[in-house]
Image: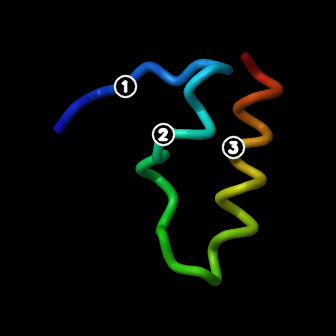
């Protein structure tokens, strides 16, 4: 397993492991990425 430091520049390209890749979770996954971006 590779640990990646998320930044404003790479968050769109990286997978956040705590999100399930199921389509029904897509909204939550996107909201979490938006929240992370606001915290940078």
- Mark number displayed over residue 4: 1
* Residue ID for mark 3: 33
Which of disc 1 and disc 3 is earlier in sequence?
Answer: 1
* Residue ID for mark 2: 14
Q: Alpha-carbon neighbours of circle 2 within 10 Å: few (<14), some, or many (≥20)?
A: few
Q: CA distance from mark 3 to mark 2?
A: 10 Å
Q: Judge left or right: residue 19 versus residue 40.
A: left
Residue 18, how many percent across, how many down? 46, 53
Q: CA distance from mark 1 to mark 2?
A: 8 Å
Disc 1 to disc 2: CB gap under 8 Å = yes
Q: Nearer the viewer, residue 22 or 10?
A: 10
State which mark lies toward you, 3 or 2: 2
Q: Alpha-carbon neighbours of circle 1 within 10 Å: few (<14), some, or many (≥20)?
A: few
Q: Secondary structure at mark 3?
A: helix
Residue 36, how many percent across, how many down? 70, 32
Q: Alpha-carbon neighbours of circle 3 within 10 Å: few (<14), some, or many (≥20)?
A: some
Q: Nearer the viewer, residue 24 or 10?
A: 10
């Amino acid at each position: 397993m590779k640990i990646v430091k998320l930044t404003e520049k790479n968050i769109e390209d990286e997978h956040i492991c705590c999100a399930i890749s199921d389509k029904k979770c897509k909204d939550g996954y996107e909201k979490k990425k938006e929240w992370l971006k606001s915290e940078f």
